[in-house]
Image (cartoon, grey):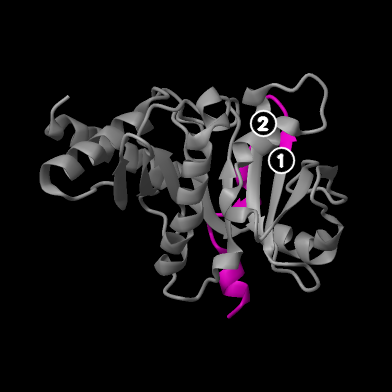
Amino acid sequence: MNVSLRTSAALLLASVIASSGFASNFIGLPRNVLWVVLQSCISTKALIGESFPCLVVDPGDRDVPGTAVLRAPGQKTHTVVIPTNNVIGIEDSELQHDAGYTYWRAALSARSFVTAALMGRLRTEDVGMAVNSAGGRSQDQLHIHLDCINMDVKSALQQMGHTIRTHWNEFPLTLAGSRFFAKRITANEASDFNPFSAVKSLPVKNIHSEWISFAVFSASQPGVDAGLYIFAYHAPESHAEKLLDHRCRVVLSSG
């Protein structure tokens, strides 16, 4: 596919995302549209040194896989991190190894794109990350969502964050209509953590990798050591992205 065709595909995706966000199923559209747009980012980077329509493209090297960061067109803060390799989604076995750590670190770093979009009005601690299950996503290329924490989730963490341990337990409150398992990652573990591997040990029977969805938030509540919380649940259409708020009301609430 030449550059002009890839650019056209990127514009097509932009028009869809502007109205739906990555959250909704692209009814009638192939599940590889995101992959096509990613190829345009990679080609543009190679040809002219620009990452358009992505914000940034890191091609990686022989030892470290590449990543790209893309802003959902028409949305101020909603951002996704995408492998430049073909990684179908959370069920991909590649994520259990070094690649999983690489994509996780890229997501941690990409939180700065969300905070920069609001010019310092949003704390890094109020940026969440999420990956949906095979049935809960619309595209078959791994993409890690980043955006503001849902206000109800933030309130729940302030109330009950102290109950989250360093092993999986059911969180005592319902979040966005679902019951999640939660686990705390200490500050020392955060950069060397692989959430794709961690969710494989959820305490559920007959676990299916493609049914898992998870979200990660900062553990910055009073009385809790700095670190991270990971929330996950297991269902055919699990969709932890619902714990993020693409309208970013957490900023409005802080004045």
The residues colored magenta run: 232-255
Crowd band around label 1 with a 10 angstrom C-alpha radius: few (<14), some (14–19), many (20+): many
Residue sticking out furthest to the front: 63
Q: Give me the residue at 53% from left, 31% from top.
A: 95
Residue type indicated by callout 1: Ala
| Number of numbered discs visible in the structure rendering | 2
Q: Is residue 18 left or right of residue 208?
A: left
Check if mark 1's residue and mark 2's residue have beta carbons within 8 Å: yes
Residue 188 appears at what percent x and percent y? 65, 59
Please identify the quarter of the rendering in which residue 223 is found.
Answer: bottom right
- Identify the residue position indicated by label 1 in the image: 232
User: As drawn, is 210 to the left or to the right of 46?
Assistant: right
Nearest the viewer among 63 and 86 is 63
Q: Which amino acid does the dot numbered 2 rest on?
A: Ile
Q: Is residue 89 above or below residue 231?
A: above
Q: Identify the secondary structure beneath mark 2.
A: strand
Q: Nearer the viewer, residue 111 or 147?
A: 111
Q: Which residue is mark 2?
A: 212
Q: What residue is rendered at 24% in x and 48% in y?
A: 51
Residue appearing at x 82%, y 28% in the figure: 204
- Give the farthest residue toward the top: 206
Of residues 201 and 142, the one nearer the viewer is: 201
Please say if 123 is above or below 199: below
Q: Assess whether residue 118 is covered by the magenta stretch.
A: no
Tell me where residue 203 appears, x and y as whole percent. 82, 32
> Which quadrant is the C terminus positioned in?
bottom right
Q: Earlier in the sequence, mark 1 or mark 2?
A: 2
| Label 1 residue SS | strand
- Residue 132 can be seen, yes or no: yes
